[in-house]
């Protein structure tokens, strides 16, 4: 065996007079048998892709059903496509981005066409570039999408992913992300997976093509004339038509059994028995050849040189052993090394080995690799061979974890740390390593594994720091994806045992959990404890301590003190180093919201959002987008609010978030209802409600009730507004979305008036006035005055009160609420017969709603204007279809001057998808150029991300 491969006279290169039928269920001429309808579906999908647009299909079935054969047949039907293969290998499941490397390596020449941040992340993950920072999974996934899209600009692309269940998690997630986001590019994805083997979240929205067993007729055609029909029928019945079973079993029958003159074996292998059959195949190998096969199964690269070297170290003839395995069709030589003829052979090889054989082969690989350039890989094999504690080896695995983590291989890093914990010897060190494994699993997005590892720490140690880290990890998982009450319990427990930065993290997260649950005393307690430990925290955590204190004062009702504290928080965020820390965008947005002064900090928020995108801080980006969307709505930038909230829902759903995504869905519902998209509003509201239920915050989610009420109001359903809001009075006293006392009163008073319950409206308006402090922000005072005006019977007194509302609106920046006040005032004047005055206010309201693109409210104002006897000045452009949230986002970025590629990079879409959205925008708005588009959106353009941020 030479270093470059086997000698030319070995069995790897010798021709054979008779090739054995391959194990994927094909006939001897390589044509598919009995899969006509399945192939028709694949061909139809390829035709759709040729016509434009991406498509995906997942082929499912038990082992041996011909999934791989169908993928190869798809390749044959797509001669003009660039075909990219990803073949899952069980032993490479923990090798981060091993599967993705198979695709990316073929397209490496396109890397220059990928947005820079995405290319950096992709290159770092695949080892193409020097790592200066850890790439995020989302940026790697976006880079994968952009890389495939770049190739699709030149010709259609067919991505074939075989054995999805064995593709490493990072690669599978990146490819699934690309499949979902490549909407308008000529790209086809065909996945093949064993039944029930793929996580439901990965391919839940991909159409499935299940493969059933072959019929008797097809089975006869598959096994061919060497098996008489009666025997073929028996085999079809006993194997359930499994093509692999039919081929493998029929090949092992004697001539007399194939002819039906001798009895068939009593039991034929099927399913698990099929794997047993492969063990029988392996049993035909000599002991040395079985060892060679086991080495190939355990070595992640299946390198011929490595396996041969390991065999030589054991005193075996490696060349002869490998040739024997190839001659018996167990192994197949490839340019890059060795492969198993069928994945079940790999499983069978590992399963058939004794624990002693298994450890011996790992030890041989460790010794072989330690002499070369892969000492860390050698450490892994050494660990697998070890049965006793070995602290030095444990620390080598920690270095292996660090190496994997630097390439964003969090799943592999987690596995290395878990194994290191078993070898550490010292229980405290073992707990520390397990806690680190849990943290890496969380970063890898493996929620189930994160919970399992954290539970092992909590069940197995009394070491406070490790328990604290495990509890914080568990609490954060629950806070973002699960139950907020349970998260609060976990974080409270963590805060009792955590130390240093972990303690700061626990307390700040606990404060937010308690705020979401309406536990105001708990927020104050968290704030006090954070202040006590502030000296041992870093700048960001000290900021969170200050913000938590301000939050506690704000919800406690001391508006003046909270304003001073919140202003100080914003000023601190505006100074280095925090002004360049994307995490600060969340406390910034919350602080501005509590102050009611969004505009002064908006450019700083845009700067931080830009940093979050550039650095792939998606954990920050999702909640921040939801908060910024609320801020945009405050400023009257409803287009931007609609776009940001829509993006937050897309990203958040993919991350599996709950509370933050519920907030974003609620904003999408509000924006959709205001545009007259009532069905879209119902869908978004239902999703927000589902996520809120999952998070366990329904009893405290006043924002959800307020959104439901607003949607009902947009439909003209005042009774629906009452039904949505009245229960909140009993639930928490009618608290508003930001915790303000009786914050639901303005909407409920208006609805009471509309349904004729005037006495209840007057009583509630009086109660609202009583609990609203005199130093409340101008917007609150404006809405209070409007609410009072609605229940005043005397016209002059009512108009004077409306006047106070408009005066307060002049000091508050919230165009929608100001226009809403003018609409109500104009309606009151019209009913009083003062039409000329009514028209002035109604026209002002109508123009404001039109500037915000809120078609439903424009229509309401037009109806009121018509009722005054004046013909409403209808919009110059008739809009048959409002823009979707994503279309609005594309329009805003295009109006800013971004190119299609720049927009695609910002929204993690492909340029072709952006082209489609722009075409839709032009059609719906009757634009003829980007100049017209930019002019139309000039009034609602957010601050440029390049603007100098100001505190």
Image (tube, rainbow, N blue to C red):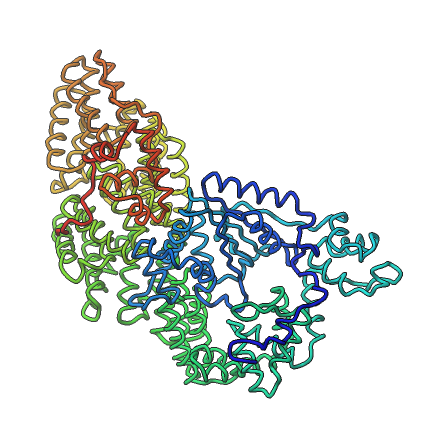
Q: Residue 413 location, x and y as percent?
A: 41, 70
Quarter that holds the N terminus: bottom right
Q: Residue 404 location, x and y as percent?
A: 39, 70
For this rendering, which residue is in front, 792 or 628?
A: 628
Task: Identify the image quadrant of residue 784.
Answer: top left
x 13%, y 59%: residue = 575
Q: Residue 159 location, x and y as percent?
A: 49, 52
Q: Is residue 132 left or right of residue 259?
A: left
Q: Residue furthest right?
A: 261
Task: Identify the image quadrant of residue 281.
Answer: bottom right
Residue 484 visible to the viewer: no
For this rendering, which residue is in front, 917 or 223?
A: 223
x 86%, y 58%: residue = 260
Task: Identify the image quadrant of residue 837.
Answer: top left
Q: Is residue 200 above or below residue 466?
A: above
Q: Residue 500 location, x and y as percent?
A: 26, 71
Q: Residue furthest bottom?
A: 315
Q: Is residue 131 left or right of residue 810?
A: right
Q: Is residue 109 above or below residue 593?
A: below
For this rendering, which residue is in front, 187 or 949?
A: 187
Q: Is residue 735 above or below residue 623?
A: above
Q: Is residue 267 left or right of residue 496?
A: right
x 77%, y 51%: residue = 220
Residue 33 visible to the viewer: yes
How many marks the image carries: the answer is 0
Q: Is residue 244 left or right of residue 571?
A: right
């Amino acid at each position: 065996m030479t270093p470059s491969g086997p000698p030319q006279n070995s069995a790897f290169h010798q021709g054979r007079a008779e090739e054995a039928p391959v194990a994927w269920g094909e006939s001897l001429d390589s044509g598919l048998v009995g899969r006509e309808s399945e192939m028709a579906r694949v061909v139809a999908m390829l035709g759709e892709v040729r016509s434009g647009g991406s498509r995906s299909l997942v082929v499912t079935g038990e082992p041996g059903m011909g999934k791989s054969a169908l993928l190869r047949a798809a390749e044959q039907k797509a001669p003009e496509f660039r075909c990219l293969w990803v073949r899952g290998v069980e032993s490479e499941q923990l090798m981060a981005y091993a599967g993705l490397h198979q695709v990316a390596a073929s397209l490496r020449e396109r890397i220059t066409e990928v947005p820079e941040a995405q290319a950096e992340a992709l290159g770092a993950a695949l080892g193409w570039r020097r790592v200066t920072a850890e790439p995020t999974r989302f940026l790697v996934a976006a880079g994968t999408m952009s890389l495939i899209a770049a190739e699709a600009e030149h010709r259609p692309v067919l991505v074939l992913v075989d054995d999805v269940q064995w593709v490493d998690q990072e690669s599978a997630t990146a490819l699934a992300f690309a499949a979902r986001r490549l909407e308008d590019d000529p790209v086809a994805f065909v996945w093949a997976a064993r039944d029930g083997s793929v996580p439901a979240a990965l391919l839940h929205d991909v159409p499935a093509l299940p493969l059933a067993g072959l019929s008797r007729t097809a089975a006869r055609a598959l096994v061919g004339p060497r098996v008489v029909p009666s025997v073929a029928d028996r085999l079809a019945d006993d194997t359930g038509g499994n093509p692999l079973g039919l081929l493998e079993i029929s090949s092992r029958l004697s001539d007399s059994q194939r002819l039906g003159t001798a009895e068939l074996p009593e039991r034929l292998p099927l399913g698990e028995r099929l794997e047993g059959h492969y063990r029988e195949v392996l049993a035909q190998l000599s002991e040395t050849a079985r060892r060679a096969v086991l080495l190939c199964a355990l070595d992640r690269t299946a390198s011929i040189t490595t396996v041969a070297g390991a065999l030589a170290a054991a005193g075996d003839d490696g060349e002869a052993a490998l040739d024997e395995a190839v001659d018996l069709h167990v192994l197949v030589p490839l340019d890059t090394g060795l492969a198993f003829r069928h994945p079940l052979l790999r499983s069978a090889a590992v399963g058939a080995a004794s624990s002693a054989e298994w450890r011996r082969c790992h030890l041989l690989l460790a010794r072989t690799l330690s002499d070369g350039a892969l000492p860390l890989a050698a450490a892994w094999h050494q660990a697998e061979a070890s049965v006793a504690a070995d602290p030095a080896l444990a620390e080598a695995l920690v270095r292996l974890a660090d190496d994997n983590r630097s390439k964003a291989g969090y799943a592999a890093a987690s596995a290395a740390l878990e194994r290191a914990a078993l070898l550490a010897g010292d229980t405290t060190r073992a707990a520390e390593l397990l806690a680190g494994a849990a943290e890496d699993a969380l970063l890898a997005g493996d929620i189930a594994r994160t919970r399992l590892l954290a539970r092992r720490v909590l069940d197995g140690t009394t070491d406070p720091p490790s328990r604290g880290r495990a509890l914080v990890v568990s609490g954060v998982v629950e806070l973002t994806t699960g139950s907020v009450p349970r998260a609060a319990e976990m974080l409270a427990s963590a805060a009792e045992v955590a130390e240093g930065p972990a303690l700061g993290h626990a307390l700040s997260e606990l404060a937010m959990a308690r705020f979401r649950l309406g536990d105001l005393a708990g927020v104050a307690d968290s704030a006090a404890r954070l202040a006590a430990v502030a000296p041992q925290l870093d700048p960001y955590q000290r900021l969170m301590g200050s913000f938590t204190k301000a939050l506690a004062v704000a919800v406690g009702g001391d508006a003046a003190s909270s304003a001073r504290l919140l202003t100080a928080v914003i000023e601190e965020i505006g100074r280095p180093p925090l002004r360049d820390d994307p995490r600060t965008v969340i406390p910034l947005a919350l602080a501005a919201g509590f102050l009611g002064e969004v505009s002064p900090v908006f450019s700083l928020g845009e700067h931080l959002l830009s940093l979050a995108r550039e650095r792939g801080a998606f954990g920050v980006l999702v909640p921040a987008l939801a908060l910024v969307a609320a801020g945009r709505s405050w400023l009257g930038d409803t287009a931007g609010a609609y776009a940001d909230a829509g993006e937050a829902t897309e990203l958040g759903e993919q991350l599996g978030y709950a509370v933050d995504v519920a907030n974003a869905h609620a904003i999408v519902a509000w924006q959709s209802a205001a545009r007259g998209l009532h069905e879209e509003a119902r869908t978004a509201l239902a999703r927000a409600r589902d996520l809120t239920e999952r998070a366990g915050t329904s009893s405290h989610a006043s924002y959800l009730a307020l959104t439901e009420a607003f949607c009902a109001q947009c439909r003209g359903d005042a009774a629906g507004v009452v039904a949505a809001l009245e229960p909140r009075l009993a639930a928490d006293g009618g608290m508003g979305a930001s915790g303000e006392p009786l914050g639901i009163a303005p909407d409920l008073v208006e609805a009471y008036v509309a349904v004729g319950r005037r006495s209840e409206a007057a009583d509630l308006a009086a109660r609202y006035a009583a609990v609203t402090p005199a130093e409340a922000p101008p917007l609150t005072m404006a809405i209070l005055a409007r609410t009072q005006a609605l229940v005043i019977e005397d016209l002059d007194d009512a108009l004077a009160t409306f006047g106070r509302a408009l005066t307060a609106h002049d000091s508050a920046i919230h165009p929608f609420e100001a226009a809403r006040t003018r609409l109500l005032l104009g309606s009151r004047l019209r009913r009083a017969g003062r039409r000329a005055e009514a028209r002035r206010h109604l026209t002002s309201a109508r123009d404001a709603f039109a500037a915000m693109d809120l078609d439903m409210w424009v229509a309401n104002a037009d109806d009121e204007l018509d009722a005054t006897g004046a013909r409403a000045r209808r919009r110059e452009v008739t809009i048959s279809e409002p823009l979707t949230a994503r279309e609005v986002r594309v329009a805003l970025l295009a109006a800013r001057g971004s190119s299609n590629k720049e927009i695609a990079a910002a929204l993690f879409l492909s340029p072709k998808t952006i082209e489609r959205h722009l075409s839709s925008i032009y059609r719906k708005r009757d634009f003829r150029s980007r100049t017209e588009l930019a002019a139309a959106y000039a009034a609602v353009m957010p601050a440029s991300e390049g603007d100098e941020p100001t505190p």
